[in-house]
Image (cartoon, grey):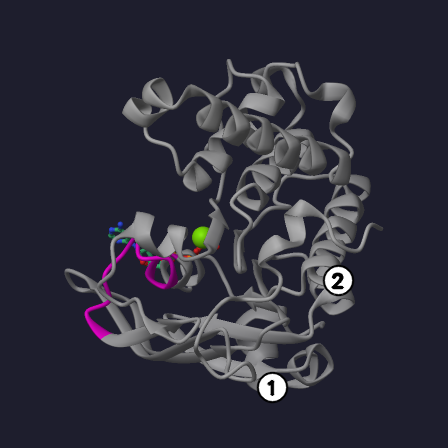
Amino acid sequence: MAESTMLARRAVPSTDADPDAPMMVAEQLTLRFGGVVALSDVSLRIGRDELVALIGPNGAGKSSLLNVLSGFYRPSAGSVRFNGHDVTRMAVHRIAGAGLARTFQGTHLLPHMSVLDNILVGRYMHMKTGLAAAFAYYPFAHREEVEQRAVAEEILDFLELEHLRHHPVGTLGYGMRKRVDLGRALAMQPRMLLLDEPMAGMNSEEKEDLARFILDIRELHRIPVVLVEHDMGVVMDIADRVVVLNFGCKIADATPAAVQRDPAVIEAYLGGGA
Ligand SMILES: Nc1ncnc2c1ncn2[C@@H]1O[C@H](COP(=O)(O)OP(=O)(O)OP(=O)(O)O)[C@@H](O)[C@H]1O
Ligand SMILES: [Mg+2]
């Protein structure tokens, strides 16, 4: 794989924070919806190039946690630091602009647009040129457009989607759509990726492909990835660390092997036969 790609531009974070400090630090997060406590006193650290799996039964609070980390939900209590900055009350688009990219449970793609255009949507986050400037300084805007396309093409190539670049996303199978969704997130040249069940509904071959891409992203870009995933085989294969939620509480945070043996996790999630 190429060493210095445009995609890897953000691999070395331009931050004044300590380079060894965790990329993300969540402290004592609580999230309530009326009487429902979706998260209860959850603290979490994510290192600079860690692949962390987030597991737990349905309704445990996994999506809620990703929503709080990325600014979609405001926590009732607690704080989130990302790349050395307090982002707890920051607007979603500013957190995204600071380099936190995510995918959603289900896909949020534009079905009538092509694979390439969907990936370019992720690039708009990087457009320096506003519309007025684009008219006033056309050559500059044009240069930027060329650069956006070059990055999008690189992502198509990396995710082995070149042959589908002009296909409307709505005509693709589920596995390929999820791959395009990952491409859209990558197009933001993120400093960190949050993936909410990207493999749900995939067959085992599609899961293997996506797991390989996730490992490649980590390898090539050296960015941390948080992956919500129910398939324990995948989790055990690729995660450095596993965080387990149950009824909004963090009940384990350890290596895959240790989590698999943890009686509280077996009781809550893995079942007696695990
Ligand atoms: N916007 C919301 N309004 C009200 N309650 C919510 C909202 N989002 C989540 N919840 C509740 O918070 C709890 C945690 O939900 P969450 O979606 O985070 O779980 P999850 O672990 O992602 O589950 P799944 O595995 O089914 O995706 C659930 O009781 C859910 O009903
Ligand atoms: Mg969820």
Q: In which quarter of the image is the C terminus?
A: bottom right
Residue drawn at the location 64% of the way across and 71% of the way down: 49
Q: How crowded is mark 2: few (under 14 residues within 10 Å), some or many (20 or more)?
A: few
Foreground pick, 78 / 49:
49
Q: Is residue 182 left or right of residue 160?
A: left
Residue range (magenta): 67-77
Foreground pick, 185 / 20:
20
Pinpoint residue 32: horizontal percent, then vertical percent: 21, 65
Label 2 sits on what residue type?
Glu
- Residue 239 occupies which quadrant of the picture? bottom right
Foreground pick, 200 / 102:
102
Residue 121 vs 39, above or below: the answer is above
Instruction: Decide whether residue 91 is among the magenta residues.
Output: no
Decide if residue 174 is in sight here: yes
Pointer 2 or 1: first along the chain:
2
Q: Is residue 34 left or right of residue 182?
A: left
Residue 266 vs 140, above or below: the answer is below
The nearer-to-camera label among 2 and 1 is 2
The residue carrying mark 2 is 219
Decide if residue 107 is in sight here: no
Pinpoint residue 73: horizontal percent, then vertical percent: 27, 56
The residue carrying mark 1 is 263
Residue drawn at the location 52% of the way across and 16% of the way down: 113
Residue drawn at the location 55% of the way across and 66% of the way down: 55
- Residue 59 occupies which quadrant of the picture? bottom left
Query: Mark 1: which secondary structure?
Result: helix
